[in-house]
Amino acid sequence: MKNLLIIYLLFAGSIAFSNAQSYQEEEVTLSVENGNLGGIIMLPEGKKKQKVPVVMIIQGSGPTDKDGNSAGIPGKNNSLKMLAEALAEEGIASLRFDKRGMGLSQSAGKEEQNLSFDDFVADASQWFDYLAEQKRFTKVGIAGHSQGALIGLLVAQGKSASAYVSIAGASISIGETIMGQLRANPANPPAIIEEAKNIMDELQKGNKVSEIPPYFASLFRPSIQPFMSSWLKYNPQDEFKKLNIPSMIVNGTTDIQVSMDDANRLKAAKPDADLIIIDGMNHVLKDAPAERNANIATYSNPELPLNPDFKLVITSFFKEHLITTK
């Protein structure tokens, strides 16, 4: 798969997927400074005593668990668990883990004011080291979804990762993203936009802003500012340029959170990366219409399978770079 810039329009009938369970799961734990991080390793059925490649799966922002489900949205979509199952069907193990304060990592939670974006990077880095040290795994790949794409990118730079995939990953800093959303809302007058920019500028410098207007309380509350400051310093395009391993960018045409512009900017930043655009796939990797309400409804439907074209391209990419001997 070399430098692909295409829209996948495959016939679903041409891909055969078994409904039988083809995996085994085991819970694993990492000890950190203030508790334990927990995750699930999924192994292909019958491979528990054999050496296999493994992919570390990193979820997106907010209260999102290892399976891709957000505590802020009713119901489940189980997208990342389904991704792990798709990899297992092709003989590839995976690790998906809960972030600090959630699920299996509940004991390692921090107060919001003490949490930084770099904590998530450091945690993912420790998980990578754990996988790399396991003799049962031959090679380690990284798949990051949404915010997890940036986390995975930062981890991959300093580790012995064999392949990396950005799934619905942003291409601009969180500061640019927020400012773009504020400017796009016609209800926000220029004075409000300028005020937000001034706050953002201070946070980017690492400064705290004590006086926050009520209308910005949820966005710039003092307790979230350390996390924002640590996140603002990263530009995904700049970080992607530093990566020197096989890489792929995957986005869907009906993703209402991350645009095709993001995919194209990442491709421009790293021209040797594969770019795959999946027709009709949304942010949670399911078939979905562009209409917002119907699109969001898929975020809460665990019965919907992954887009079949997505399953094909991501498993093919990791098979090529983690299994195939060149």
Image (tube, rainbow, N blue to C red):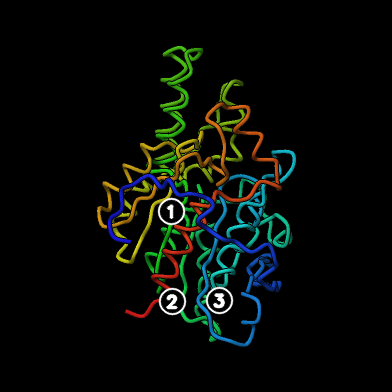
Q: Which of marks 3 and 2 is nearer the N terminus?
A: 3
In the shown orientation, is residue 146 left or right of residue 24? left
Q: What element carries label 3?
A: helix
Position of 84 relative to 44 (above/below): above
User: What is the distance, in whole Å, between disc 2 and disc 1 at their CAs?
Assistant: 19 Å
Could you classify mark 3 by the number of other residues whose Cα lies within 10 Å: few (under 14), some (14-19), or many (20 or more)? few
Mark count:
3
Question: Horizontal and vertical percent for residue 94?
Answer: 57, 69
Crowd rating for badge 2 (residues with CA inside 10 Å; few <14, some 14–19, many 20+): some
Q: Quadrant of the N terminus?
A: bottom left
Q: Which of 28 and 7 is in front in this view?
A: 7
In the displayed structure, 134 sits above or below 168; it is below
Mark closer to the chain start, 2 or 1 = 1
Relative vertical location of residue 116 with respect to residue 158 in this rendering, above or below? above
Which residue corresponds to the image point at 65% horizontal and 40% vertical from the top-left? 299
Q: Nearer the viewer, residue 83 or 126?
A: 83
Q: For marks 3 and 2, give the one nearer the viewer.
A: 2
Amino acid type shown at disc 1? Ser
Hey, what amino acid is under mark 2?
Ile
Looking at the picture, how far across and down is residue 107, in whole percent?
73, 61
Alpha carbon separation for disc pair 3 and 1: 21 Å
Residue type at mark 3 is Tyr
- Name the residue at the front extreme: 13
Q: Mark 1: which secondary structure? A: strand
Q: Name which quarter of the figure residue 26 lies in.
A: bottom right
Residue that label 1 marks = 166
- Disc number placed over residue 323 in the picture, else none: 2
Q: Is residue 155 left or right of residue 131?
A: left
**Residue identified by numbered label 3:** 130
**In the foreground, 77 or 89:** 89
